[in-house]
Image: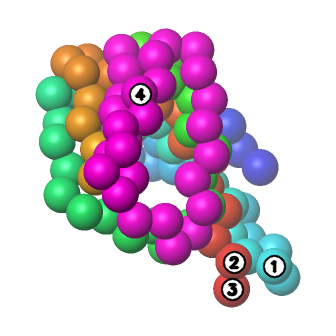
Amino acid sequence: IIIPNLTVHKSTADPSDRQKPFLNAAGTMWVELEELNVLKRTLVKLSENRLITVIEGSVTLDVNGQDYTFQKGETFYMQQGYEFTSEATENSRLLVACFQSH
């Protein structure tokens, strides 16, 4: 497994520095750094499991009408098939470890 360059700060940076896949018989795993700027997403259905740590800022998830807010330093898990909407504060950064089963 290769760890991405976490010193990348600009959204124009090469995406290959953010995602490094690892494939085995059970599925594919990768780690990426997401940089968000006052983002509000419509309903999303995950195609992979995610373990997310908030590096900077905060992110709020809306799950069936209930909000869950995660701040800098907090980690949360989202299961494959999970449906949600989300909103991030300005200059939020998330470290995301993903696993997609075959």
Q: Which residue is mark 4?
A: 69
Which residue, given by chain and number where applicable, does mark 2 sit on? Answer: 101
Stretch in magenta: 57-83
Proximity of marks 1 and 3: CB atoms separated by less than 8 Å: yes
| Three-letter amino acid code of the residue under disc 3 | His
* Residue 27: image location, x then y, percent: 73, 76
Mark 3: secondary structure: loop
Q: Residue at x 36, y 15 (%)?
A: 57
The rendered magenta stretch, by its main secondary structure, is classed as strand
Quadrant assignment, res 90: top left
Q: Which mark is residue 26?
A: 1
Residue situated in front as seen by the camera: 94 or 18: 94
Which residue is tagged 3?
102
Cα–Cα span, label 4 and label 1: 32 Å
Please provide percent x and percent y for residue 10: 27, 24
Q: Of discs 2 and 4, which sits in the foreground? A: 4
If the image is split into quadrants, where does the C terminus sit?
bottom right
Q: Residue pushed farthest front? A: 65
Q: Amino acid at mark 4?
A: Thr
Tell me which corner region of the image, top left, top right, bottom left or bottom right, holds residue 24: bottom right
